Image: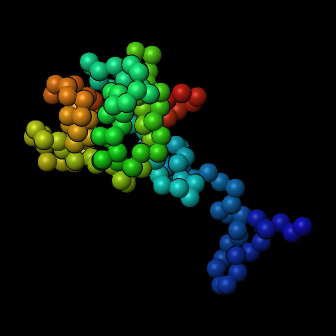
Amino acid sequence: MADLYGVAIGGGVSGNVDDNARKLVGDGTAGVGPYTRFGTPQLQALKIISATVDFSSTPSAANSNLYKAVTALQGLAEVYYVGIPGNTGTGFVALVHLNKTDTSDGYGASSTIATTYENVEDTIRAALSTAEDDVTVTNVALTGLTFA
């Protein structure tokens, strides 16, 4: 069988197919991981934490805290995965579409730069009926064998 990875591109284009074959092109600088581009949307991991809400308390029950938080998150992000709440039940990780996630400032924000997840925090907090600033949403890196 012919080696299709080493053949010339042809059609007046210089180079070989193998110049771009058999590689993982990362999302970071100089192609360094994480690696989330496999013909699918680029994903990012969000960590949702609450100081007072237990997300692990009966998550399969109707209208549970985890359900309320995920439903609120779905209103502002395209959600692909929701992890099991942590040991203490105060938070969980969700994988969302990078370019379809609301990063705008929230209701009481004083900043005009849209680089936070304040709208997401405020929406989840409202769905859980918790106090202002009770919910924190941060972008986290997925490294090694665990979520960091």
- Any part of residue 74 in sight: yes
Say which residue appears at 49% left-offset and 35% top-offset. 142
Q: Residue furthest right?
A: 1
Q: Residue furthest front?
A: 62
Of 117 and 89, the residue lying toward us? 89
Q: Is residue 64 above or below residue 120?
A: above
Q: In this view, does 52 lie above or below 82?
A: above
Say which residue appears at 39% left-offset and 19% top-offset. 57
Q: Is residue 2 above or below residue 101?
A: below
Q: Is residue 113 above or below residue 69?
A: below
Say which residue appears at 14% left-offset and 48% top-offset. 112
Give x and y (percent) for residue 17: 70, 68
Residue 44 sits in which quadrant? top left
Of 92 and 46, the residue lying toward us? 92
**Figure colour scheme:** rainbow
- Number of numbered discs on residues: 0
- Any part of residue 141 in sight: no
Give x and y (percent) for residue 15: 68, 72
Residue 134 sits in which quadrant? top left
Of 56 and 87, the residue lying toward us? 56
Residue 1 sits in which quadrant? bottom right
Give x and y (percent) for residue 65: 33, 27
Give x and y (percent) for residue 61: 40, 26
